[in-house]
Image: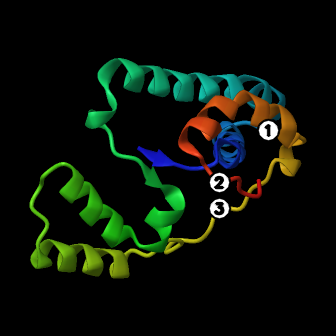
Amino acid sequence: MTHRDPVKIAASTFSLLRCLTGTFTNEDHTEYIVSHWPDTLSTLLDRAMDARDRIGEESFYDVAYADLVRDPVAVVGSIYQRFGIEWNPEKEEYFRQFHAANPQHKYGTHTYSLAEVGVERGPLDERFARYMARYDVPREEA
């Protein structure tokens, strides 16, 4: 399970949904998006944590998003090792070549912020507090 500040994820989600909902209309759906999606994202995180409590932690492996961005090949190797899948120099080289050919932002960047949709961070921090505390997720600028 990859972990990232859910407030940052919410800001990205708001931006993506505004783009998608505006594809075939001039109607502005921002109010609906920012009123509906924080609950949806919070529910998704709560259900994931509840499922882990039921299933047991041994079936999961936690990865920090920052680590995945910093060294994706090392993270993939750690996942293989965690689940007892062979990790060898050939696989590592394949992933290194793939990553070199497909770096982050290869096709541009997605810029977004809470400010662009008029949302304050505080209520989102409260909504996602359980998740942030459980996984000690670092706060990001949103």
Type of amino acid under label 2 = Pro
Give neighbour class at mark 1: few <14, some 14-19, many 20+ (Cα, 10 Å): few
Mark number, residue 110: 3
- What residue is disc 2 on? 138
| Above or below, 35 relative to 103 | above
Question: Marks 1 and 2: CB-CB under 8 Å?
Answer: no
Give the left or right position of residue 23, taking residue 89 as reference: right
- What residue is disc 1 on? 26
Instruction: Report the residue at 58% width, 21% height from top.
Output: 43
> What is the secondary structure assignment of the residue under circle 1?
loop
Mark 3 or mark 2, which is nearer to you?
Answer: 2
Instruction: Report the Cα–Cα distance between label 3 and label 2.
Output: 20 Å
Relative image position of residue 123 (x, y in whole percent): 83, 31
Instruction: Report the residue at 74% width, 30% height from top.
Output: 33
Query: Where is residue 75, by image quadrant?
Result: bottom left
Query: Where is residue 32, by image quadrant?
Result: top right
Q: Earlier in the sequence, mark 1 or mark 2?
A: 1
Question: Relative to the observer, which residue lies in front, 79 or 99?
Answer: 79
Instruction: Report the Cα–Cα distance between label 1 and label 2.
Output: 37 Å
Instruction: Report the Cα–Cα distance between label 1 and label 3.
Output: 21 Å
Give neighbour class at mark 3: few <14, some 14-19, many 20+ (Cα, 10 Å): few
Relative image position of residue 52 (x, y in whole percent): 39, 26
Relative image position of residue 1 (x, y in whole percent): 41, 43
Q: Earlier in the sequence, mark 3 or mark 2?
A: 3
| Above or below, 122 relative to 70 | above
